Image (tube, grey):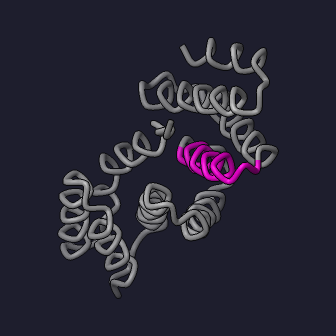
Amino acid sequence: MKKIHFSVFLLLLFSFCTIFVYAQDENAITLMSEFIKYYSAGNLSEAEAKLRQVLGSEEKMSDEFKVSVYNNLGAICTALGKYNEALIYYNKAEELESLKGEATQILGDIFINKAIIFGKRKSYNQAFEYYKKSISIYDKLSNTEKDLKNSLASAYLNYGSLCIEVNNLKQALELLYKSA
């Protein structure tokens, strides 16, 4: 049975909501609208192409906007099975987001995305480490907003699913309970 990891798509949806805030010019806004249109229609190749056009734009972009674009590219590459490329984009997003010098929900979300890839690659120790990092970040944030709760629940759910895969049922049950 093929597993679908809800968090990748949840994070894409979260990025859609914030991405226009950071757009610097009309061209980037147009490209992002096209990206959403193609993604919503299930045309991931065209959605990926639009994001690559945004990155190739000569317009100045804020770091927040770049983080969102990199994170979305990582999510699309993950969905297309291009795990090496996805990790490159997530690493770029992590690097820029880490410059803030503080724990942010976006950084936690990036860690979840990386954990999913390591889980798919059967690199369980790395996956577990990234799930723990994301949960630690979410716990540090005092925000009670729905997005944060969804991200935390998603981290526990995916972490628990991975524990089932490695036959650690006791920890899986604990994590799945926390997810609920």
Q: Please say whether residue 68 is one of the residues in the magenta stretch.
A: no
Q: Name the quadrant containing residue 85.
A: bottom right
Q: Is residue 93 left or right of residue 54?
A: right
Q: Is residue 154 left or right of residue 80?
A: right
Residue shown at the point (32%, 69%) measured from the top left: 45
* Quarter occupied by the C terminus: top right
Magenta span of residues: 106-123
Residue shown at the point (69%, 32%) measured from the top left: 165
Q: Is residue 97 above or below residue 149?
A: below
Q: Is residue 45 left or right of residue 11?
A: left
Q: Which residue is at the front of the view, 140 or 152? A: 152
Q: Is residue 144 left or right of residue 164?
A: left
- The residue at the far front in this view is 1
Residue shown at the point (69%, 38%) measured from the top left: 131
Residue shown at the point (77%, 44%) measured from the top left: 124
Q: Name the quadrant containing residue 169.
A: top right
